[in-house]
């Protein structure tokens, strides 16, 4: 390696990180601590008067943040659990059984990897089922949307697990559901970690489908509330509140990532490159 | 050798315990199909059925203005074709997807090559470049609106008065750059995994043959990255055809509908109560995605075989 590159590379990395990630994050951080008058025209200056406390308090109260947080949890957590459990059950059958019918069912079930969800007719269907503007409706839509991803990754993973592990338990007389719960699910731990973070990432920040299914109202999730806060600025910019909201809303995802970083990274990468 | 051993092993097991008389194969007994049933029901009910309904409702007058729904043939398609929104949405979305996939993969690959060695410094900065993936796309859009507004931070730093988000000709490019920025961390991780999978002796051999870093990249590493490229390009292209949040938060489809991709159009028209018209656009999106995805996946897979 040439010496220029040896020292040039870290410098280049620092420069890129500072410009591409540092500047936007800095803007969010300083603006969320400014009074409204200073934040109307967003810039990179430090606040002339620091008032992070009142901004964050305003964002929490005006943006209905606690309710939004609870609403987000109440749709995202059940969706993630369903995607993982239903996905694992299906992946187990798809990975272990070989027949034309099973392969056809598998192909159909992973078609959601590429096909777009038909959001308009989803609304139609939910209305007829009496599920529009309800959490169960939203959970069903998210589960349907992300099942393909989890089935795809889990089927690939189970195929790589030797059959002998299951057979040993079977000789001891274990029933299928017991083998599934005691052997297959625990072995799936790495994929489950990845699938959890991916589904959480998409569902936690989703606004498009939430708009159609939940709408505004008192079941609105965090991103829907953020949209309300930001749309209220047609008359007067309220960047200070928007960015206080962005910080609070992003923290859970950043925390989840920091806790599970190693597993997430290895999971994402091992599933993708096969 | 190994083959015969496996055979012998299997044969021994089959003859071991006497098989019960039954019609089902062993795999079916041990992996009953009802384990797959809940997933199939939910997926069919809330993904496939809406997509099937999407082949019917575009041909009706379903809207908030009619109490009942009647078949109207191609009326909705005629409407969106005549007012120009159909062609514009197709063109804008395809251009958006191409540019977004290009930027996302370009940034991701450059970052992966820069941060390839497994040092503590590099691991830290991989996490830094992954941060935008964790921030919601809507929030990303607002951050960049504050940066690129005519009254925004970038113009105030540069002392310019540039309408970054106000041009009908190249604001689309700016928005796709933002899209690439948001997702580059994910592509980076996948390219890093691809780079790690290249056998060390292969790179060693290239060096022994006198190949420089440039030559090594194009002749050894780039071809070996083919599976990662397939995955990244496919997910980026298909994913960005479904884009909504970033566009809504930065331009809202403007100026003059120059960034109005499919989902923005559907959102707007649905809000006006013209459900069947939105559904027609949704069907066109479905067909465009299928038309792009199938040749893309087949082509990239074939490329993997050739390289």
Image (tube, coloured by chain):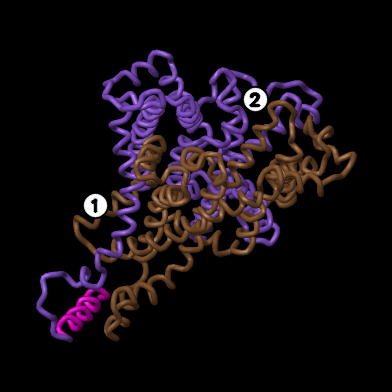
Which chain has been coloured brown in this picture?
A
- State yes or no: residue B8 in magenta: yes
Secondary structure category for the residue under label 1: helix
> For residue B159, what is the image quadrant?
top right
User: Which labelled disc corresponds to residue A104?
Assistant: 1
Q: Nearer the viewer, residue B209 or B167?
A: B167
Q: Residue furthest top?
A: B82
Determine the residue positioned at 65% across, 59% down: A255
Q: Find the magenta span and give its range.
A: B1-16
The residue singled out by tag 2 in the image is B165
Determine the residue positioned at 47% across, 68% down: A189
> For residue A161, what is the image quadrant?
bottom left
Q: CA distance from mark 2 to mark 1?
A: 46 Å
Q: Is residue A44 above or below residue A94?
A: above
Q: Nearer the viewer, residue A227 or A264?
A: A227
Determine the residue positioned at 32% across, 73% down: A177
Q: Position of residue A109 (x, y in %)?
A: 32, 51
Q: Colour of chain B?
A: purple
User: Which labelled disc corresponds to residue A200?
Assistant: none
Q: Residue furthest front?
A: B67
Can residue A227 be seen at all in this image of the molecule?
yes
Q: Is residue B283 above or below residue A128?
A: above
All told, the count of numbered labels is: 2
Q: Position of residue A80 (x, y in %)?
A: 47, 57
Secondary structure category for the residue under label 2: loop
């Amino acid at each position: 390696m040439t010496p220029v590159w040896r020292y040039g590379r870290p410098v280049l990395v620092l420069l890129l990180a500072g410009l591409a990630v540092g500047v936007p994050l800095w803007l969010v951080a300083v603006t969320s601590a400014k009074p409204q008058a200073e934040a109307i025209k967003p810039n990179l200056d430090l606040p002339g008067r620091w008032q992070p406390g009142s901004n964050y308090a305003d964002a929490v109260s005006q943006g209905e943040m606690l309710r939004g947080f609870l609403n987000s949890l109440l749709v995202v957590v059940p969706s993630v659990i369903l995607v993982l459990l239903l996905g694992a059950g299906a992946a187990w059958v798809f990975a272990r059984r070989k027949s034309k019918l099973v392969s056809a069912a598998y192909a159909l079930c992973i078609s959601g990897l590429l096909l777009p969800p038909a959001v308009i007719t989803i609304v139609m269907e939910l209305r007829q089922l009496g599920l529009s503007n309800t959490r169960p409706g939203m959970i069903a839509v998210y589960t349907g949307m992300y099942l393909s991803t989890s089935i795809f990754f889990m089927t690939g993973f189970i195929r790589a697990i030797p059959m002998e592990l299951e057979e040993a338990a079977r000789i001891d007389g274990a029933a299928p559901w017991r083998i599934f719960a005691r052997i297959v699910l625990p072995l799936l731990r790495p994929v489950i970690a990845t699938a959890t973070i991916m589904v959480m990432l998409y569902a936690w920040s989703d606004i498009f489908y939430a708009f159609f299914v939940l709408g505004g109202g008192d079941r609105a999730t965090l991103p829907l509330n953020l949209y309300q806060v930001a749309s209220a600025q047609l008359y007067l910019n309220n960047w200070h509140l928007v960015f206080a909201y962005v910080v609070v809303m992003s923290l859970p995802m950043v925390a989840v990532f920091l806790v599970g970083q190693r597993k997430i990274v290895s999971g994402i990468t091992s599933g993708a490159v096969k | 050798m190994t083959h015969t051993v496996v055979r012998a092993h299997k044969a021994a097991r089959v003859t071991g315990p006497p098989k019960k008389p039954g019609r089902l194969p062993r795999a079916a007994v041990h992996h009953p199909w009802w384990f797959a049933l809940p997933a199939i029901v939910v997926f069919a009910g809330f993904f496939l059925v809406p997509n099937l309904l999407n082949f019917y409702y575009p041909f009706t007058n379903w809207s908030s203005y009619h109490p009942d729904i009647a078949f109207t043939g191609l009326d909705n398609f005629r409407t969106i074709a005549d007012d120009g929104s159909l062609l514009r949405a197709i063109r804008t979305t395809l251009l958006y997807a191409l540019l977004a996939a290009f930027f996302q993969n370009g940034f991701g690959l450059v970052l992966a090559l820069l941060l390839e060695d497994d040092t503590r410094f590099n691991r830290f900065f991989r996490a830094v470049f992954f941060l935008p993936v964790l921030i919601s796309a809507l929030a990303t859009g607002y951050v960049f609106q504050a940066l690129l507004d005519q009254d925004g931070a970038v113009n105030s730093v540069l002392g310019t008065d540039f309408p970054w988000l106000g041009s009908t000709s190249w604001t689309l490019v700016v928005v796709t750059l933002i899209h690439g920025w948001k997702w580059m961390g994910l592509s980076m991780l996948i390219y890093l995994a691809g780079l790690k999978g290249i056998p060390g002796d292969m790179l060693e051999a290239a060096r022994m043959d006198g190949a420089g870093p440039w030559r090594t990249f194009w002749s050894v590493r780039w071809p070996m990255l083919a599976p990662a490229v397939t995955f990244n390009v496919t997910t980026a292209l298909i994913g960005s055809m479904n884009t909504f949040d970033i566009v809504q938060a930065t331009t809202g489809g403007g100026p003059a509908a120059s960034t109005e991709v499919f989902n923005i159009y559907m959102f707007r028209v649905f809000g006006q109560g013209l459900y069947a018209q939105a559904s027609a656009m949704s069907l066109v999106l479905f067909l465009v995605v299928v038309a792009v995805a199938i040749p893309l996946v087949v082509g990239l897979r074939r490329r993997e075989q050739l390289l």
